Amino acid sequence: MQAIKLTDDGSAQEHVRESTETDFATRLLAWFDQHGRHDLPWQHPRTPYRVWLSEVMLQQTQVQTVIPYFQAFLARFPDLPTLAAASLDEVLAQWSGLGYYSRARNLHRAAQICALKFQGELPVDFDQLLALPGIGRSTAGAILAQAHGARHAILDGNVRRVLSRYRRVAGDPASSATQATLWQLSESLLPDERLADYTQALMDLGASVCSRTRPTCLLCPLQDDCGAHLAGAVAQFPQARVRRERPLRRCVQLWVQDSQQRLLLKRRPPTGIWAGLWSLPEADTQDGAVEILRADGLRPLSSSVLTSLRHEFTHYSLDIQVMAVEVESLALTDSETRWISAPEALALGLPQPVRRLIESQAAASAHPLSHS
């Protein structure tokens, strides 16, 4: 057991270290063998492509949410060359609903680079892997450790929480100084064997036992020398980040249908929110949105409020007023604007609120209210 000496300011110092880094890994792996997750779809088989896809999907997203998306994506793009050969529209459509679409764009671009430079495989060199779009230090380490058993550390959200508590690492978790401390700690604790299982074990422990709220410390294999647990300060680690009030933004989107009940969709710009996805015509104001229609050669005849939506982003909230607009339909000349039926639209990459709106309107049309 590792004794902890507390200084006058309440910080922890190692006084006697009877446990070693090997003990840390041994206890963690013993716990994993009995309590860890062994049936995740990317574990069977644990190929570089499957691990990479799972790691990208798990960024900002929980495991149970990811599993059905992972399975559907893998069915459509079973290997890296298939993904590289697909169009971005196909990739975004398969990703639609999972959010954080830059992940899908980076995934697609990285696959194309691998197809050109690495014979359709992910590189096994850490620096080459790190240079690919969307792959950071932790993701690269996770791929190499889990797919190849290479000795690389990771530092995702779960692991940061486990290590912050284990060694009582204070400071803003997002600061470069705190990150450097945690990376050094993560690397120092690496075992020499079973790197794939060890990496999964760390993530599992953070997700199940060492959770953000209500951690079950009495079930933790590290409780005997966890600095935060011994000091009764688990809730204080990692240090909470200062959260700013989320600003509110507003926009107007237009629900435009022609005589065949086809919907007008426009591809969004290649940068910014929902980049590259197909969406409803949008502007800051109703007049601005109507001007977009006129620019496409469409003459608005009437309009009315269809509904209002709120969508939450990481850094702000977006209020969307959706206006139903009747237009005099003309042939479209812009390749980034198209008339499309609801079923065809749902096969495209769409922003989540637009997808939900199309689904709800399609359901309402299929089951209109009966009148007595």
Image (cartoon, grey):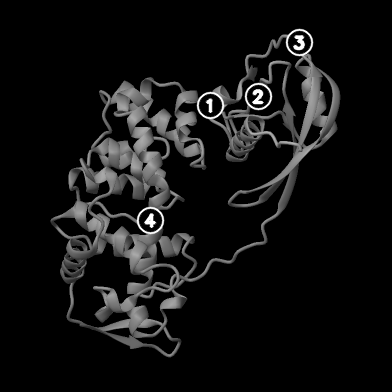
Q: Do the residues labelled 2 and 1 touch (CB within 8 Å)?
A: yes
Measured in 3D between alpha carbons, the distance from the residue under mark 2 to the one under mark 4, in whole angstroms, is 37 Å
Residue 365 relative to residue 201: left or right: right
Q: Residue 156's mark?
A: 4
Report whether residue 119 is seen. Answer: yes
Q: Mark 1 points at which residue?
A: 348
For discs 4 and 3, the disc positioned in front in the rendered view: 3
The answer to whether residue 111 is above or below residue 179 is: above
Q: Which amino acid does label 4 sit on?
A: Asp
Q: Which amino acid does label 2 sit on?
A: Leu
Residue drawn at x 28%, y 43% is: 42
Q: What quarter of the picture does the C terminus occupy?
A: top right
- Quadrant location of residue 224? bottom left
Is label 3 in a helix, a strand or a loop? loop
Q: Mark 2 points at which residue?
A: 265
Is label 2 in a helix, a strand or a loop? strand
The answer to whether residue 2 is above or below residue 203 is: below
Q: Residue 256's mark?
A: none
Residue 328 relative to residue 25: left or right: right
Question: Which comes sooner in the sequence, label 3 or label 1?
Answer: 3
- Quadrant location of residue 77? top left
Question: Which comes sooner in the sequence, label 3 or label 2?
Answer: 2
Q: What residue type is labelled 1?
A: Leu
For discs 2 and 4, the disc positioned in front in the rendered view: 2
Measured in 3D between alpha carbons, the distance from the residue under mark 3 to the one under mark 2, in whole angstroms, is 14 Å
